[in-house]
Image (tube, rainbow, N blue to C red):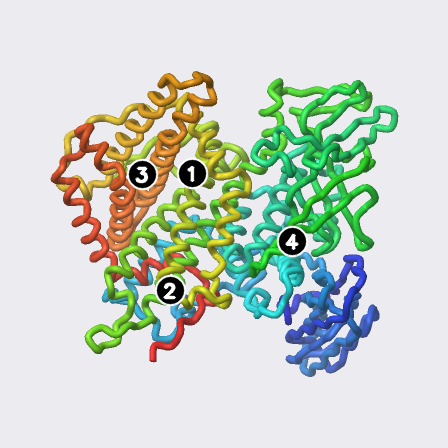
Amino acid sequence: MTLLTQPTPPTPATGQNTTPPPTPTTPGAATGTGPATGAGAGTATATGASAGTGASAGAGIITGTAPRTTPTATAAGTITTGAGGGTGTATGTGSGAGAGTGAGIGTGLGAGGRPGATSPVTAPAPTTRFPPPPPAATRRPAHRPTGGDDTDQATTDAITRELRHLLFDGDEQDTIHTPWRTLITHDAFLTDEDDLTPTQRTARSYQRLHLLNATAAGDPLALARDPRRLAALHEWTGIADSALGTLAGIHYNLFLGTLLDHDHPEHRDLTPYTTLQRTGTFLVTELAHGNDAAHLKTTAHHHPDTGEFTLHTPTPGAAKFMPNTTTTGGPKTALVAARLITHDGTDRGIHLFLTPLHDENGPHPGIHITPLPPRHLPHPVDHAITTFTHVRLPPTALLQAPHNRLDPDGTHHTTHGNPQKRFLHTIDRVTLGKLCMSAAATGTARAALTIAVHYANHRHTTHHNTPTPLTTHRAHHAPLIDHLATTYALTLLHRHTLNHHTHHHHNGTPPPPDPTHPRYPTDPPPTKEQTHHLTALTKAFTTHHARTITTTCRERCGAWALHPHNPLAHYTQHLEGTITAEGDNLLITLKAATHLLLNPPPPPPTTPTPPNPLTNLPHLKNLLQHAQHIWHTRTKQALHTPTTPHTPHTRWNNATQPALTMTHLHTTLHTTNALLTTLNHTTHPTTHTHLKNLTNLYLLNQLTPHTADLITHHHLTPHHHNQIHTTINHLHHTLHPHLTTLTHALNHPHQHTPTPPPTH
């Protein structure tokens, strides 16, 4: 299998493998092919670790079967190297005029062995590594149904372009999204993996990580500093290889990003991590301390005489659980969270320590890694339990920053008196990790919806002796249209929160202001503290709704979506991970609820009911604000209701259920702001109409559970309550002819849309 075919560079380039060769376990083989061009006529041959050069031109094909110790080769045109077991050669021929040499990369997998490493080729800017995507018309499968949309093709294409512009970061779409979207259409992501063991599937994901690093990532350090590109990485890779998104998020965000956020990263040699000679991982949670990781027990004793530290797991419950620390994927280095104990025995709080875990020969002394039982998923991660037995670390292992410093004599300095705040500052990259989980969830929801709509268009049932597409049935397409509206809303909420996070935490450019006279008024942008809590709520909100969407889409596709060839079969399992990772949804939502109780939103204005209130978007938003105010009041009343015993714990237990409803409505209001802001930026009238109808449908669906409260508090009349169902049904009818167009705007790669079963 060829993992990458490089364009022939204009100047000579030499492929080189600097990764130490892993020890083979059982034989395997890998082959690679690629075009070759050059000048004159010549032949190049490489065997083992030898290298050959030649001049050739025109076009030729180079094929290779390489041993696990990947040869270094320079040849005319492009050479693809593979990693596997056994021995092999790579040869190339060509004739014509011109001159050139080239380098290529490839990987293979020997049965039971480690993945081959890609050559550390310097990647150009992400947008130039791959050719641009083909025009929309060429990406559509033949005879693709239009869903009844009778809009002319030019108008449909204009609508699709504007919707994608609005959904995918506008003019920055080609920088933020296109490299990742193009990456997952590569042959490396389109191979059959049914015959691979769980370990081999994990190894395949690490191979793809090398491919990502050598291509779409561009400058790995720049990627680690760019929140929006990091989030987009998860948005697209998650639909093709969920383990790759996990591995990349840990390596680039939690590991490299944390290194860059601490003191003097230029004094550390980051080359092993930027070239993936060593993969980074992040060890914080323990067997006995997950959501309460601030109470973890791993220790690091400082020795002022040498400046070294001793890293130790003092109890079984302090074992690190469950990061990717096994030898699969090659050597790894971890950032380990441990309590710094100075020479006087004082616990100085949790710090991070740069700790090499293993190399080609296995774990380093004192480090014990126990792989967890493999999960039988298409893309499992090599989760493990890791312990340390008096592991000596050099003085440079401690990560220091202005909020945490240690002098050589053991004197400790901190700007945070609160240990909890100091710990959260130390692991601040987890906040961005929440938005990476939100990105993975929204990308998965878009993919699931696209597959389900595609199936509904192609799958036929017999109705009055006439084959009829499933999509014509209201019972089938109404839930899909509801979820389409929610998917648009989740995508825009994610963008809204991520843009504010980037502005407040990474010195980014603030989001563009609304037009001077917006059609739909929106609230002021959130402050830095509000954005921190909104980030947690966005993660919980998007992952929860995305799971619901994918479950419905799986059901709408019947037995066809239960088989491994259909990604819908495992999307829901992927989303289960996003719900727990980077903070359990329930916990982070309740934590945000306490902030809302202490910082209540202002009461909504009481405005006269406008004509046609159920289609008036500002009025519907006002109703949501009233619903939030009602539940905020209920939560405060529950918190102050006498309990037995009357303790803070029992009082909070009394208030948690209304608090969860309050935070859900609060996040829904932020989602509404994101939708209305986007509507303010539409330019094409038909695009505006479609997005307005989707927003209208979303708001009515969100308000429906609260109509009784709104009637009781005189914000909604019984007549309008009775009209909600009719209005929703009318919106389904209005949007249905445009279902395919609106889904096509989600830009899901057709290579990841499985072909439905035959209709005859």
Q: Label 1: few (<14), some or many (≥20) within 10 Å?
A: some
Report the residue that reaches farthest toward the front: 644
Query: In the image, residue 235 lies at what x, y percent?
Result: 49, 52
In 3D space, how far apart are the residues under numbered discs 3 and 1 (Cα atoms)?
Answer: 12 Å
Residue type at mark 2 is: Cys
Q: Nearer the viewer, mark 3 or mark 1?
A: 1
Please give the residue where the numbered disc 4 appears in the rendered image.
373
Question: Around disc 3, counting alpha carbons within 10 Å, would you say few (fewer than 14), some (14 to 19), or many (20 or more)?
Answer: few
Q: In which quarter of the image is residue 311?
A: top right
Instruction: Judge left or right: residue 751 versus residue 294.
Output: left
Residue type at the position of mark 4? Pro
Residue at the spot of label 2: 557
Q: Which residue is drawn at 25% across and 44% down?
A: 700
Look at the numbered discs 3 and 1 and tell me whether their residues touch, using CB distance below 8 Å.
no
Please tell me the numbered disc located at residue 511. Answer: 1
Q: Distance between the residues labelled 2 and 3?
A: 42 Å
> Which residue is nearer to you in this view: 519 or 526?
526
User: Which amino acid is tagged 3?
Assistant: Pro
Mark 1 or 2: in front is 2
Q: Residues within 10 Å of mark 2 (few under 14, many from 20)?
A: many
Badge 1 marks a residue whose secondary structure is: loop
The residue at the point 64 percent across, 75 percent down is 35
How far apart marks 1 and 4 lie (CA) works out to 45 Å
Query: Where's residue 32, x and y in %?
Result: 67, 73
Kindly indicate the quadrant of the structure image that contains residue 646: top left
The amino acid marked with disc number 1 is: Pro
* Secondary structure type for disc 4: loop
Q: Mark 3 sits on what residue?
A: 515
